[in-house]
Image (cartoon, helix red, strand yellow):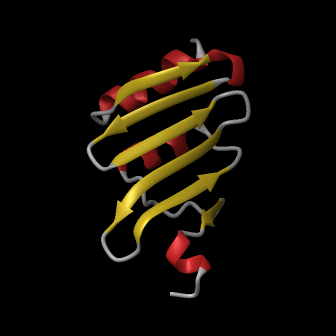
Amino acid sequence: MNIKREIWLLANKHGYRMEQHQENIFLLIFVKPGVQINVYYSTMTVGTAINHPKQGKTQLFRRGCSLQDLAAIFKNPRAHLGTGYHELTELERRGG
């Protein structure tokens, strides 16, 4: 099966809609209220942007995800898979 289709099916199963497909950079963007998930399907790098209850807007990136990892992320975008890195918010950069 086509990887883009498999990713879309996983997203759809968990209530996401596809916002964009940027084929030139192999990017699929999925959204649902309060969450955006960016999937770079050539490298299977996944970025999640959410409104964290305590930290405010946060971003987490995970490289080399499997489809199983991606399913876990769509199920819970805050899932800790041990493969990610956190992008600091402006407040965190200022030491707050």
Quarter of the view holding residue 81: bottom right
Q: Residue at x 50, y 26 (%)?
A: 7
Quarter of the view holding residue 61: bottom right
Q: Nearer the viewer, residue 67 or 55?
A: 55
Q: Is residue 80 left or right of residue 34?
A: right
Position above or below: 86 against 29: below
Q: Is residue 30 left or right of residue 34?
A: right
Quarter of the view holding residue 13: top left
Quarter that holds the N terminus: top right
Residue 41: where, in percent of width, then height?
Answer: 64, 28
Q: Is residue 51 left or right of residue 67?
A: left
Q: Residue at x 56, y 58 (%)?
A: 60
Position above or below: 60 against 69: below
Residue 94: where, in percent of width, then height?
Answer: 59, 82
Residue most extreme to the top? 1
Q: Nearer the viewer, residue 1 or 50?
A: 50
Residue 12: where, in percent of width, then height?
Answer: 33, 26
Position above or below: 15 against 69: above
User: How many numbered marks appear?
Assistant: 0
Q: Residue at x 61, y 27 (%)?
A: 27
Q: Nearer the viewer, residue 96 or 62?
A: 96
Q: Residue at x 57, y 35 (%)?
A: 39
Residue 11: where, in percent of width, then height?
Answer: 39, 31
